[in-house]
Image (spheres, helix red, strand yellow):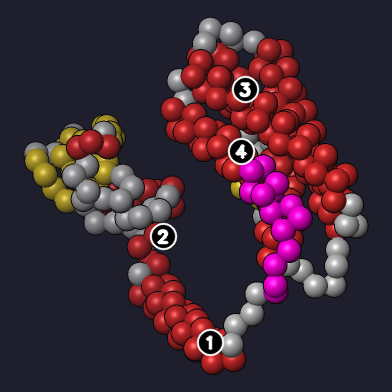
Amino acid sequence: MNSKFSTGQIVRFSILVYWSIFWFFNVIDKLIGGSMFLWVGRDRFAQFQKFFASAGLDSRTIADAALIVAAGLEVFAFVFFAGALLNFLKNRVETSRSWFFLGIVFTLVTFTIFSIGDHIFGDRFELLEHTLFWFITIISWVVYNRLEGVEEEDLGLERKQKLIAGIVSLFLIIITSVSVFDYNENFFHRRISALETEMVGENLYKISFPFLGGSTVFEKSLFKFKEENPNLRIIQLYTVPNSLRLKKADSLIFYIVTEEKS
């Protein structure tokens, strides 16, 4: 690339970097197939098997074959976007554009297949996500081509503007940092501490979870309840459907049904 970058070059470079990183991490997610240190992924093997089983095809072979096809498409997309990026850095405009086009094609094919699968397996959330990415892919191609050959002056701000922007940014960073540390100091315990139970009926108690309260909170809350009520035996736990939570808890409401110990 030239020593001076036009705004068009910066945007096109950013598009190539984004799609290269996007498909790189998708490929890594397939390779890892779950969670590990510094990586919280999804077990794609189990996900695909669950999808096909829900459609009556309870076969590991079919699910694994579909996953291999999906991973293959993603690998091709990554390779072509990465190739486009490398050629762009070497100022090979036409070659970079050709590689980018093939990356776009594989991306469109991948998201189209995923969208069809979302319809078949009834996953509306994934359908929305894949449809949005399909249109983002088209937009990326249009923007990339519109900016090809467009040379603009380097972007620049006046010294006064830079100073004002720096002061405002620094002020907001300080305010945000203070807020983060204040939360950690005064409210973070709600994510790990046992919760209070509320009696709502005879032998019926309710616990409302805080935001992001996980298994630790659940276990500690049950242990605390049993300690505070040694004469009661827990016979059932059940949760409330989302539509009935009435925004009283960000994550979960569950009820404890008890009986007197004999």
Which residue does the numbered mark 1 point to in the structure image?
A: 161
Q: Does residue 228 show up magenta in the picture?
A: no
Q: Quadrant of residue 122?
A: top left
> Which amino acid, by three-letter code, is at mark 3?
Ile
Residue occupying the point 9% across, 39% down: 202
Which residue does the numbered mark 2 point to in the structure image?
A: 192
Q: CA distance from mark 3 to mark 1?
A: 48 Å
Comparing 224 with 249, the one in front is 249
Q: Position of residue 215 (x, y in %)?
A: 43, 47
Which residue does the numbered mark 3 point to in the structure image?
A: 113
> Nearer the observer, disc 3 or disc 4?
4
The 10 Å Cα crowd at callout 3, few under 14, some 14 to 19, many 20 or more, is: few
On the rendered image, what quadrant is the N terminus found in? bottom right
Q: CA distance from mark 3 to mark 4?
A: 16 Å
Which label's residue is closer to the chain start, 4 or 2? 4
Which residue does the numbered mark 4 point to in the structure image?
A: 138
> Nearer the observer, disc 3 or disc 1?
1
Q: CA distance from mark 3 to mark 2?
A: 42 Å
> Which amino acid, by three-letter code, is at mark 4?
Ile
> Which amino acid, by three-letter code, is at mark 2?
Ile
Q: CA distance from mark 2 to mark 1?
A: 45 Å
Q: State the SS at label 1.
A: helix
| Magenta extent | 141-154
Comparing 222 with 245, the one in front is 245
Question: Tag count in the figure?
Answer: 4
Q: Is residue 229 visible?
A: no
Which label's residue is closer to the chain start, 3 or 1? 3
